[in-house]
Image: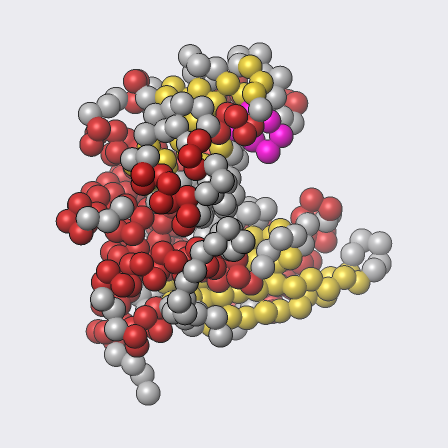
Amino acid sequence: MATLTSPVSISLENEKNPWLAAAARFDEAAKRLKLDDGMRKVLGTSSKELTVHIPVQLDDGRIEVFTGYRVQHSVARGPAKGGIRFAPDVTLDEVRALASWMTWKCAVVNIPFGGGKGGVICDPNILSDTELEKLTRRYTAEIIDFIGPERDVPAPDVNTNEKVMAWMMDTYSMHARHTVTAIVTGKPMALGGSRGRPEATGRGCMMVTQRALRLMGKRPEDTSVVIQGFGNVGGMAAKLMSEVGFKIIAIVEYDGAVYNPNGLDIIALQRHRKETGSITGFPGGEDMDKTEAMFLECDVLIPAATENVITSQNAHRVRCKILCEGANGPTTPLADEILAAQKVFVIPDILANAGGVTVSYFEWVQDRQGFFWNEQLVNKRLQEIMDESFDAIVEYAQQHNVNNRIAAYMVALDRVAVAIRLRGIYA
């Protein structure tokens, strides 16, 4: 059983290991909270880890066996909550790290969930819809005793979407012999999805950025933004931020970047990408090297794609005042030290991108009530939670003389530890 409790040493060789990155932040926060060894062991150990092997008959008649995981890090504050990703580079270490991050993320925004995460090692780009559905349904059946509205509530993640969630919900419901909409979140609206959910992670990034600007006495109209990633999180953040006056000067994608110092027309860029399959060649901006674009001088940098994009090898090139982490784990622990020396105001991932899980919580609540809210109410409640959480983290950081990331971890660990102490250890 992997734990976060062993001494953590981050070096250039293991800098990008997500499990060790989670362990390093956990270790620092636990030391500052003066947690005893027993509590560190409980908080630092996954509650359950499941590995499944999934046979799927492909369209050409061949049978392939895929490996999948589901990790529940903690259920002390409520059901485990976390996405399912389909990718060829999924590892158990990655899933463990992401599950622990979900525990801390839910605790940071103070919603009654623990942390979970799942993944299947596959390349969905080479699977047909039929093959993907077979894989999803068999994976769901293999983990079905692990999940449930009161146990563990999956959601979309990398390379999964509302269609995959619909297949998961249907599979679970067929086994239960009645419709169970609250088994997953991120579903289509017609199957119990929530208004505002597709925009929630990007909207949350915008909300905490606005909160940071208030601290600095700046306005969106005077703020330049570079966003890495133009998918659900980055694309939505770009659209919403441009609508309220932010100047989005560059968008960075896997195949290139586009730049306009006067601000990009995000709607036109989204249309261009839909028509051409790429953001490059956009008439409203100039193409740039994607690495150079990441390190343009700007007020706000939002890495909203993958892990480990800001490392000890490039952190010194970051030229932003605010780093808002739309992705999970975009900054390594070694890079944190460099950013701190450069006085970059970091809004850590477990706060910055928590808008998604917050509205997932709203979806779960609505499904269980059988009563659905309008989008105005969803966004109002999201704003309240993101503002309160941001203010609490910044105040805690100032009081304890730590950076925002360690403050967020300390708040999260303390909230989970309180729940465990109150519940006691069942024996």
**Residue most toward the left?**
399
Q: Is 82 displayed left or right of 375 in the figure?
A: right
Residue 180 at least partly seen: no
Residue nearest the viewer, comparing 14 with 117: 14
**Main SS of residues in magenta:** strand
User: Which residue lies at the image location 18% right of the left edge and 51% below the top edge?
Assistant: 400
Task: Using the image, determine if residue 389 lies above or below residue 425.
Answer: above
Q: Is residue 254 magenta?
A: yes
Structure colour scheme: secondary structure
> Residue 278: x percent and y percent?
62, 26
Occupied quadrant, residue 376: top left
Return the x and y of residue 300 as percentages of the image width and height. Answer: 36, 29
Q: Position of residue 150 (x, y in %)?
A: 39, 67
| Image: magenta residue range | 252-257
The residue at 53%/61% (across/down) is 93
- Residue at horizontal 25%, vertical 34%? 211
Asked if one can make out residue 67 in the rendered structure from this viewpoint, the answer is yes
**Looking at the image, which is closer to me, 102 or 42?**
42
Q: Nearer the viewer, residue 292 or 47?
A: 292
In the picture, the quarter occupied by the C terminus is bottom left
Q: Is residue 333 left or right of residue 395?
A: right
